[in-house]
Amino acid sequence: MFKLEKNIVFVVSLLIVFALIVVGALFPESLDRWTAVMHSAIIRNCGWGYLLSAFLFLVFSVFMAFSKYGNIKLGQDHEKPRFSYFGWFSMLFAAGMGIGLIFWGVAEPMSHYLNPPAYIAEASPEAAKFAMRYSFFHWGIHPWAIYIVMSLSIAYFSFRRGMPPLISSCFFPLLGEKIFGFAGYLIDILAVFATVFGIVTSLGLGAMQINSGLASVLPFEASFASTIAIIAIVTVLFMMSSMTGLDRGIQMLSKANIMLAILILVFMLLVGPTTTTFNVLLSTFADYASSLFTMSLSTNPFRGPEWTQNWTLFYWAWWISWSPFVGLFVASISRGRTIREFILGALLVPTLLTFVWFSVFGGAAFHLELDQGAQIAAAVAQDVSTGLFKLYSFYPLTNVLTLLTVLLLVVFFVTSADSATFVLGMMTSGGQENPPASKKLIWGLTVSTTAAILLFTGGLEGLQRMAIAAAMPFAGIMLLLCLCLLKGLRYEFKQELPKQEGESEGSPGSI
């Protein structure tokens, strides 16, 4: 039996999530109305805060990478990285992007192309250029900067300073011993809440796309019931994986993910419009780089603010709501790396793969749409989860590609959910690096049930609203994390490192 004093974060956060599940099951229309009102209020009054916060996180990450603190290790000075670069990058990509990138690789450029902001003509060359640029923007360096702030803080205070691997531990420079009381509990409960509703958004999207993919090659019609069946089956799979631990289950699945994703990517690059793909990649990257500052802070208050609210603000809220989960997971796999190595690796490598992915799939979709009248955008407008499979229908080995992608989605689903249950178990077990199997089981079932309830009450919109709501308080917490990390690093740099150097030279301090 759990002791309440040691499991207060677990009990309180679980009760909050259960309360929402019950409300969603008994009063779905009421929950849908409530999330709609809450979403509208947050976007209308606080949307600018998401943009500003994400930009500040990017500036902070770049500063830390090239600052005097860059050579400090996330761990003790003698420690070596626990995982190889390939294993590390595989787990980074699987936890940080995974399902979402496959879902939106075709769907997002096509959605922006048909429904750009009001000041851009629909289905025009300008709309196509805009669509690719903002796809890069939404999935580029900003999301990883958000993750880096969280994971860097946790890794430093946990592995360098010897504190429990919890978000509350990062606030020791500001709160002192209060992190072990009510203030610390509150921070960790908010982290659990944000993690649950961040992960269920991605799992809901993944289940919808698996459903669409299977329906395109097998003799059945995609429905809500089949989506729930998929969630149930994959829940069993990721719970089995979660029992094998970090080194075996998650790492092996992540490596399988990345190899299968690269296989599909290379095939599409070779059989698709290769020249067009490289032209799109180079042109969009130049457009993205030259417009980065403007896009980072533009809310478009005078022309088309609704588009920014529906897309960019949702994404920034989504990444922030994912940050406790991804941050704690990425911290746990990054021990032994220097701050500079960690930031540059996490900021650049996954982003580069993401840009190539959008160029291959988005570029191929535009080639078919503009040159051959393939109507891929119309298919996306009808059902956003079918875009990728509509693209496959114009390529050889359509059914093989579809089934491989469904397999990739399932493995990403399993990896993301496996990682989430691992992290939720750590958060609600006082930072134990090997959380109890019982808690991982409870959180796994809770996450899957929550995804099913939100799909039932509001579909994709319901998932998006909950992600935005969960992210609002956490944006402020992350801004304070930057301050806490700086205070911790400055203290070490000014007080402890000089002392250690003196001790190594045989000073009186070495006695």
Image (cartoon, grey):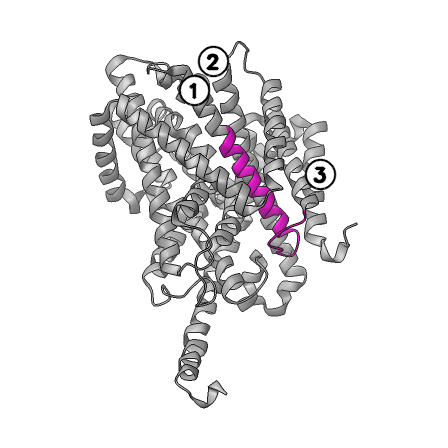
Which one is earlier in the sequence, the residue at label 2 or at label 1? 2
Q: Which mark is on residue 402?
A: 1
Specify the farthest residue to the bottom: 508
Residue that appears at 34% across and 56% down: 62
Mark 2 and mark 1 residues within 8 Å of each other at the beta carbon: yes
Task: Name the one closer to the observer, 54 or 161.
Answer: 161
Mark 3 crowd level (few <14, some 14–19, many ≥20, 10 Å Cα): few
Amino acid type of the residue that numbered disc 3 sits on in the rendered structure = Ala
Residue that appears at 61% across and 26% down: 233
Q: Nearer the viewer, mark 3 or mark 1?
A: 1
Which one is earlier in the sequence, the residue at label 3 or at label 1? 3
Residue 373 quadrant: top left
Task: Name the one closer to the observer, 479 or 496.
Answer: 496
Helix, strand, or loop for circle 1? helix
Q: Where 72 falls versus 154 (above or below)?
A: below
Q: Which mark is on residue 309?
A: none
Res. 44 in view: no
How many labels sit on residues? 3
Mark 1 crowd level (few <14, some 14–19, many ≥20, 10 Å Cα): many
Instruction: Tell me the CA gap for discs 2 and 1.
Output: 8 Å
Helix, strand, or loop for circle 2? helix
Magenta residues span 410-436
Amino acid type of the residue that numbered disc 2 sits on in the rendered structure = Val
Q: Which mark is on residue 19?
A: 3
Query: Does the magenta run of residues contain 412?
Result: yes
- Left/right of residue 277 with respect to residue 376 in the rendered view: left
Residue 239 quadrant: top right
- Residue 273 in the image, given as x and y percentages of width and height: 24, 22
For disc 2, the marked residue is 217
